[in-house]
Amino acid sequence: MLVAAVALLAVCCAGLLALCLWLMRAQKAQARLQAEREAAHDQRIRELGKRLDAYLSGSVRMGEELQELRRLVAPLPDKLSQMEQRDPGSLSFTQAARLIGMGASIEDLTQACGLTQAEAELMSRLHQPRPTKR
């Protein structure tokens, strides 16, 4: 009976040894798989970082250009006011443009602004609301 118990114990030890070897191989395979996944994630993070840097530099450039446009556009309302005050004839064109925006006809423009028929037609065509495309 002792021999049978020792034999059974030897078989159990051999089985446990085989199980340990199998688990060790499985662990190594999992470690390799995890390393591959981490490498892929690291590569993806680097790619996304490069894209983010490109977006940020584009945004900075766009902001700089926007600042430049603001600097250029800021004096325009004052210049327009000065031009309107200098040339009384141009005031009638400004007034005509406003009247066209409110729906005035060509006859209304000639009477209210002192424009010729041709000038009123030109102003009407220039300042008509354009139909929106769908």
Image (cartoon, rainbow, N blue to C red):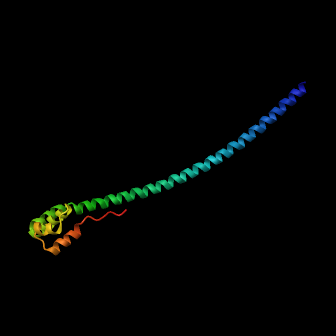
The residue sitting at the bottom extreme is 118
Frontmost residue, 119 versus 88: 119
List x then y, in percent, for residue 37: 60, 49
The quarter in which the N terminus is drawn is top right
Q: Nearer the viewer, residue 61 or 80?
A: 80
Asked if residue 133 is positioned above or below residue 3 in the image, the reply reads below
Q: Quadrant of residue 87?
A: bottom left
Q: Compared with residue 39, is residue 85 higher up or lower down, i.e. above or below?
A: below
Q: Is 16 positioned to the left or the right of 49 in the image? A: right
Residue 66 image position (x, y, % from top left): 30, 59
65, 38: nearer the viewer: 65
Asked if residue 57 is positioned above or below residue 17 in the image, the reply reads below
Percent position of residue 133, x then y:
35, 64
- The answer to whether residue 87 shows anywhere in this view is no
User: Does 105 sit left or right of 1 as displayed?
Assistant: left
Q: What's the residue at 12%, 71% (across, down)? A: 115
- Count of all numbered marks drawn on residues in the image: 0
Left or right: 93, with 128 as reference point: left
Which one is nearer the viewer's eye here, 26 or 103? 103
Which residue is located at x 74 percent, y 38 percent? 20
- Residue 74: which quarter of the image? bottom left
Placement of the C terminus among the 4 image quadrants: bottom left
Residue 122 appears in the picture as rendered? yes
Q: Residue at x 87, y 30 (%)?
A: 7
The residue drawn where x is 20% and y is 62% is 103
